[in-house]
Image (cartoon, rainbow, N blue to C red):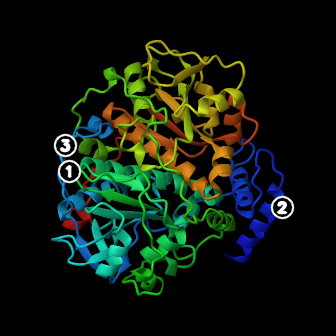
Amino acid sequence: MSESAKEFCYAASNIMTNSPGKSVDTDSMDVVYAYHDRTKHQPQRYARAPGYMDWANQPDPFRYYDQASLFSLDQPSITDSPGYDSLFKTGQGSVVPINPQSISHLFFESLAISAWKQAGGNRWSLRVNPSSGNLHPTEAYLIAGPIRGLSDVAAVWHYCVYRHALERRLVLTSEEWTAISQYLPSASVLVALASIHWRESWKYGERAFRYCQHDAGHAVAAVSIAAALLNWDTRLVGTVTDDELAMLLGIHQQQGHEAEHPDCLLVISAAAGDSLRDDPVIKLSTPPLGRLKTGKFDGDPNTLSSTHHEWPIIEAVAQACRYDGNPVPGHNHESRGEAVPAAELTEDRQIPARRIIRERRSAVAMDGHSHINREIFYRMMMHITPCPDNKIIKVLPWRAKISVVAFLHRVHGLSPGLYLLVRDPFHEPSLRKTLRPEFRWSRPADCPESLPLYQLLETDVRDTARMICCHQDIASDGAFALAMLAEFDASLEQYGASFYPRLFWETGLIGQILYLEAEAAAIRATGIGCFFDDVMHEVLGIHDHAWQSLYHFTVGKPVDDPRLQTLPPYGHLQGFIED
């Protein structure tokens, strides 16, 4: 940790000791609370950021490992099946075996380039997974045993988005792969995610750590959804520390502003009939893996920017949130009180899932007058609510920590106003105690019985939504906007400072589902990272850290820019686009 980061940690400890609403008094918790409060946007001041756009020094959005062995992946075509709605049902279709084609599908339908956009002389890429400011701090790795047609040996691979290829960073011995995979189903691969904080802090300054965690959550969901298309199951690993994960990926050897920081490790199982545990076990501290700490990884990371700006608060909070391997208790679906999908919302609309995934775009403006039907809204809320069949949400091993406040503007059959989706029944007593006593807590007419949705206030909330979201019209011009509330104090007190990023991961997962829900309904969505945190809390009557707003979202009819030209995603590899 740099001296400037240490100075912030010391100051944070002094500032946050005895802070209201926090019972755990440790250095790491102090730093997390200090960071969270310091990086809130306020109407009179925004969180600290550069204040200008240093376009000449914008980080390269693509990471390469020069001199690493390269394996090019296929670019699969879009198929009519499976249907999008089948993603939210279990036991649909047959399991696809692990081979080069299915691995190509996994990355092409989760993290690859989805298109290039061009306006005049400017051209930029879009990806299947969204990112704050389209800056893409998230890097992905594949750790797998021998795969016939891809590799005769087990290896650690970096996914190179620009080339849609795997870069081999390390060959694993059979003993090393056995040590890694010994507790996993027979047909399994691992996908790891890491973040380059500089890619976000270049534009957003101190608030960038939040946005990196949003993006990690979107990526977790994107990978889980792509795996579900192959009828594979995905789970987050809770037995590997951040230090061990960094060692496995070889990023522990990186230093400086462009270093990758470990986020998470996912187990993906393609073993038919061999169920994947909700709390899969991987042990990286065993003697056979000792070589990884000092081993030589192939390839050198490319330089992203020529100069950098110091943001010591990001280094400090990242260090405070390092995960030490203390696992979060896994799912227990028999006692979770999860919703059961309403029968009238479970019919398969036969919308090709791969088309929805590849064509997903973030709206830049809404038209301000189009409505959606309440059935569409109910379906969206159902699909972001935990239930036994929702294989996407099950990737995270903890009970839901996020409930959702909805600003309804234009939903046929539902009055404009403020609504609340209680995503876990354990949230309701705390929310009733915390939120304004005058809220009505009434069930909307014709709402599915299994959907825990309440109307809090019936009124025009367009101006409120716009003002809260940094005066952005997109929050009021759609059909509805959302604020994702985290059970903040209780989560951190139970699981510690390392759970702070995981709260954002859950919001990103919810957001990714909402993006696809919007595409399936022939509309669009976009995440909103700029909002006045405490103004949102004041609207709800929140005056402590029991619940905190972490992410905002808007859904509606988009306004397209006719000046933009769309180019094929990998045209630069075929010579259609100038490299």
**Which mark identifies residue 14?**
2
**Up-down: is 267 above or below 409?**
below
Is 144 or 480 nearer to us in this picture?
Answer: 144
Q: For mark 3, what is the residue?
A: 93
Q: Amino acid at mark 2?
A: Asn
Bin the neighbour count of mark 2 within 10 Å (Cα to Cα): few under 14, some 14-19, many 20 and up: some
- Circles 1, 3 touching at the beta carbon (< 8 Å): yes
Q: Is residue 193 above or below residue 458?
A: below
Separation of residues labelled 1 and 3 (CA atoms): 7 Å
- In percent of width and height, residue 302 lies at 42, 77
Q: Amino acid at mark 1?
A: Val
Mark earlier in primary sequence (2, 1): 2
Across and down, in percent, residue 235 comes to 40, 54
Q: Nearer the viewer, mark 3 or mark 2?
A: 3
Q: Sequence order check: which comes first, mark 3 or mark 2?
A: 2
Q: Image quadrant of residue 366?
A: top left
